[in-house]
Image (tube, grey):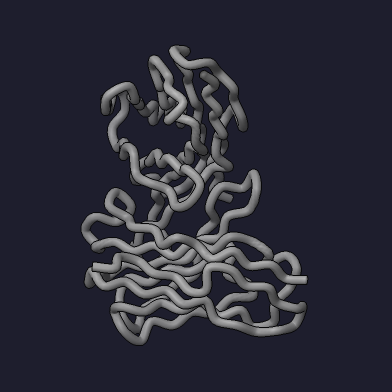
Amino acid sequence: NAGVTQTPKFQVLKTGQSMTLQCAQDMNHEYMSWYRQDPGMGLRLIHYSVGAGITDQGEVPNGYNVSRSTTEDFPLRLLSAAPSQTSVYFCASSYAGRMFTEQYFGPGTRLTVT
Amino acid sequence: EDKVVQSPLSLVVHEGDTVTLNCSYEVTNFRSLLWYKQEKKAPTFLFMLTSSGIEKKSGRLSSILDKKELFSILNITATQTGDSAVYLCAVKILGSGNTGKLIFGQGTTLQVKP
């Protein structure tokens, strides 16, 4: 198993550009989520999904879109990048019955918006 | 607004010292409190606490929850340089649609010097 994979590892965008951060897992996990981590802020939940076709907003959803068309993939779209979105982004997944206690995190994507 | 606050934000100790990390919370629909350790990259799960007064222990790490006073502590005894990391506290709450989600604190950065 590859676990949770994220691409790209690093990305630099100009203000106003759009892009998609990819997240995939091969463990058949129902629950997937996106977090951003900023210095001194811990992890903040952006969006999450409890299964294909079902998504919901976290604490900081503005400026981001998600969709879950398959169990495996949970891409995060930045519609019009802003410097405030400079951050490290983590994708995570788990079985619905063991959410968070056995939550697997991807390696992260470091995004810089200039 | 749901919030989780950790203290101190950073801590420097010497090997062999004992440290206590604090986490307080104010949330609606509390379900459980979790501790994670983050070294360099993605967080890894340490403990989940659901009931007051019951200590969870793993080696030199232990944690306890006080649901009346709304806080938890994480103790590390006989610290080692390998304990150097960011320790994250998170509270699981029920979101919309009765789905769990995590609210994280800012993290405590622990540095253990030889």
Q: Quadrant of residue A73?
A: bottom left
* Residue nearest the observer in this picture, A22 or A101: A22
Q: Position of residue A46 (x, y in %)?
A: 53, 65
Q: Give the residue at x 56% y 47%.
A: A42
> How many numbered discs?
0
In this view, the residue farthest toward the front is B114
Q: Give the residue at x 46% y 79%.
A: A75
Is residue B62 rendered to the left or right of residue A37? left
Is residue B51 rendered to the left or right of residue B90? left
* Residue nearest the observer in this picture, B30 or A55: A55
Q: Give the residue at x 54% y 29%.
A: B110
Q: Quadrant of residue B73?
A: top left
* Residue nearest the observer in this picture, A55 or A105: A105
Q: Position of residue A93 (x, y in %)?
A: 34, 64
Q: Position of residue B98 (x, y in %)?
A: 34, 62
In this view, the residue farthest toward the bottom is A69
| Rendered position, A53 above or below B101 | below
Q: Position of residue B30 (x, y in %)?
A: 39, 45
| Rendered position, B44 above or below B61 | below
| Rendered position, A21 above or below B93 | below
Q: Give the residue at x 54% y 66%.
A: A109
